[in-house]
Amino acid sequence: LQNRLGDVFDRLKKRGALKEADVTAALREVRVALLEADVALPVVKDFIDKVRERAVGQEVIKSVSPGQQVIKIVHDNLVEMLGTEAGTINLNAVPPVPILMVGLQGGGKTTSTAKLAKRLKEKDRKKVLMASLDIYRPAAREQLRVLGEQIEVATLPIAENETPVSIAKRAMAAGKLQGYDVVMLDTAGRLSIDESMMDEVIQVRDAVNPVETILVADAMTGQDAVTTARNFHERVGLTGIVLTRMDGDARGGAALSMRAVTGVPIKGVGVGERADALEDFHPERVAGRILGMGDVVSLVEKAAETIEIEEAERIAKKMQKGAFDLEDMLSQLRQVKKMGGLGGVMSMLPGIGKLQKQMANANVDENVIKKQEAIILSMTKTERKNVKLMNASRRRRIAAGSGTSVQEVNKLLKQHQDMTRVMKQMGKMGGMKGLGALLG
Ligand code: GDP
Ligand code: MG
């Protein structure tokens, strides 16, 4: 997929503007990417239309190619659609606050009930009571009880001959009497949407008036996600979604589908079977995962924010000629700092993705960069242009001026020397591609 997108974007780049035909070509591939990520078809259509409308005619940012800009527009719209509001559990009500967990069987309801309870207990310091309303499967109630023991959260004692509504009422009464902050109600699911399940959930809802009604759904659900979410939202009324099994291969298309259909926020992401395997929802991450090109997106994002490709190319040319002076190194360091240590201007140039990764991993420490910056700033302009001037007394002066040591000045000069050497070699091997080959 990445290659396919890459091809289209390369073509776009050569034309240099966001014309309708270009955008359409790119979006055709984006469409395939979304479908591959299991986003439901109607959602894909809406999304593509919206992006096309926004993209065509948009001016191209100077520092990125038109193709990169299309990626950014697609990405930004994905993030917007996935939702940017904080996915916290609403507890604004007189305690005990009822939270209703709904969803299909096997979606991860019981597990997610325990995960949320643990989070409420540990992070929000809430006293939580959990109750299973599954009167059909004794094993389901037992499962919640065992989980409760593991995470040290109370569960409502099981009684005979009850209905889901009577258990829910009993849970609320116990919650009130025993001073619980939150009562979590884990409902029984079915293998697919059916009337009796919906009726049952609706009755429980009307009996306890939940502050949150959370749909728990498997991220692998794919095209069915829309049907499930729509049904629960229309019939019961949802306030949030917990997306489970994001630790698996799922690309997260279900998140987009369910969000598009319900408009409710995703309040948690399940990433494993254990009770602590619950994460906050990060729209950017999921958007990147859906597109299958997270790195590209963040790169473009940072590029648009902080960098001028022209500057990168100017430096790269000097590097190739071996004329990379300390002034250039300073500019490079400042870019690295701005980009949060991602690897500097070099990483923005095409064909050196591998190098970029290596640089990003090279553990760029903010303080180290600050020191290096100070050292170069303590040099005169002439010194920066001509490293050969750097004798012992100048080095001592620079160390004193920058509040560092002669060793640190030496280290920086050595680093500059190394970079120059690599650049020269790279020039011989045929430009930027050569650098990739050299380091990859
Ligand atoms: P329920 O029928 O909706 O209550 O589903 P359960 O909570 O019983 O979960 C069904 C299965 O999925 C169990 O084996 C869980 O351990 C597993 N499960 C739930 N959430 C996750 C998750 O986020 N990741 C993984 N890998 N497994 C999960
Ligand atoms: Mg269950």
Image (cartoon, helix red, strand yellow):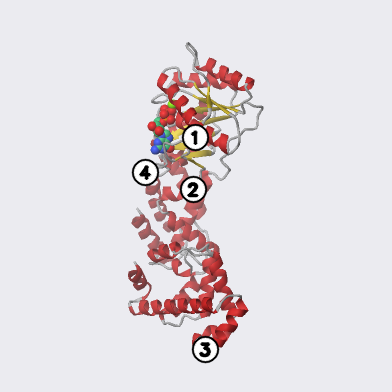
Measure the C-alpha gap from mark 1 to mark 4: 21 Å
Name which of mark 4 and mark 2 comes first in the sequence: 2
Residue where numbered disc 2 is placed? 78
- Which marked residue is nearer to the observer: mark 2 or mark 3? 3
Q: Write down the residue under mark 1.
A: 115
Q: Position of residue 122 (x, y in %)?
A: 56, 37
Q: Residue at x 49, y 54 (%)?
A: 73
Q: Is residue 104 visible?
A: no
At mark 1, the secondary structure is helix
First in sequence, mark 1 or 2: give its number: 2
Helix or strand or loop: what does disc 2 sit on?
Answer: helix
Measured Cα–Cα span from mark 3 to mark 1: 64 Å
Residue type at the position of mark 3 = Leu
Q: Nearer the viewer, residue 351 or 423?
A: 423
Tag 4: residue type? Asp
Q: Position of residue 123 (x, y in %)?
A: 58, 39
| Three-letter code for the amino acid on which mark 1 is drawn | Lys
Q: Depth check: 268 or 284 in front?
A: 268
The residue beneath circle 3 is 389
Give the label on residue 249, or none: 4
**CB of mark 1 near ligand 1 (< 8 Å):** yes
Separation of residues labelled 4 and 2 (CA atoms):
20 Å
Contact (Cβ within 8 Å) of mark 3 with mark 1? no
Residue at disc 3, CB closer than 8 Å to ligand 1: no
Find residue 53 and report its horizontal and vertical position in percent: 50, 51
**Is residue 434 or residue 419 the one in the foreground?**
419
Residue 355, quarter of the rendered image: bottom left
Foreground mark, 4 or 2? 4
